[in-house]
Amino acid sequence: MLLYNKALDANHTLLRMTALLASWNTETVEVEALRLFDFLIANPGHIHKLSVPKGKFLEKKEFKSYSNRYQNFDPKSLFNAMKEIHCLVIERLVEIGILKLESKMSYYHVLLENIPDELKLLAESKDNSISIQAIDFIVKNLTKISVTGPEGLKKITNLMDYKYDVN
């Protein structure tokens, strides 16, 4: 049986990242954070698996219902498979003018005013197959967390190695 996985679709990734950036309304974004957040938006069922202290992010339990038997994959493998698509989409966001590389190599300046009207309309539409609930959870809870460190995004998502990061 052939299954479509929106996580590996470059067009859907562009739409997810645009929706996230529009909701987040940040001035700068770190590439690794953008990739981790995009994975969670594409796979909201993974949110309930976040490794955080008991009692933190109580609403993460709501995402357990997003899991289904057809999404039987190793999260790290899928995240690594998404890397090339993430890089292509980030390059495209730079070409469009939504992202601009800062002096620090892994940071981008976000220029929301450069989002094309049609893309913004689609990204903000309720009928676009993107989990607004996941985006809201990420913006409310995860955007304030550092990517690295003992309580960073890499550790709590368990999608990237973090043990040898310099904090």
Image (cartoon, rainbow, N blue to C red):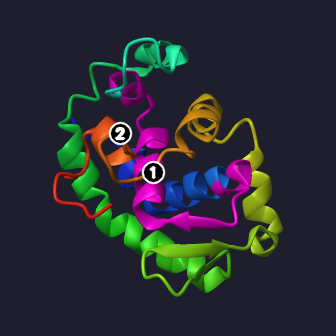
Amino acid at pointer 1: Ser
How far is the residue under mark 2 from the one under mark 1? 8 Å
Q: Out of 79 and 160, give the one closest to the viewer.
A: 160
- Say left or right for 43 vs 51: right
Q: What stretch is highlighted in magenta?
A: 21-49
Q: Alpha-carbon neighbours of circle 2 within 10 Å: few (<14), some, or many (≥20)?
A: some
Residue 92 position (above or below residue 44) = below
What label does residue 91 carry, if any? none
Please tell me whether mark 1 sits on a helix, a strand or a loop: loop
Check if residue 38 falls in the magenta segment.
Answer: yes
Work out whether mark 2 precedes mark 1 in sequence or the reverse, and give the earlier one: 1
Give coordinates of residue 78: x percent, y percent: 24, 47
Q: Do the residues labelled 2 and 1 touch (CB within 8 Å)?
A: yes
Amino acid at pointer 2: Glu
Q: Which residue is drawn at 57% across and 34% down?
A: 141
- Say left or right for 60 vs 128: left
Give coordinates of residue 149: x percent, y percent: 32, 49
Give coordinates of residue 40: x percent, y percent: 43, 40
Quadrant (top left/top right/bottom left/bottom right) for the C terminus: bottom left
**Quarter holding residue 18:** bottom right
Looking at the image, how many numbered discs can be counted on the residues?
2
Q: Out of 104 and 5, give the one closest to the viewer.
A: 104
Quadrant (top left/top right/bottom left/bottom right) for the N terminus: top left
Chief SS of the magenta region: helix
Please tell me whether mark 2 sits on a helix, a strand or a loop: loop
* Label 1 sits on residue: 146
Q: Residue at x 49, y 57 (%)?
A: 13
Q: Out of 120 and 52, give the one closest to the viewer.
A: 52
* Label 2 sits on residue: 151
Q: Which residue is drawn at 38% across and 45% down?
A: 153
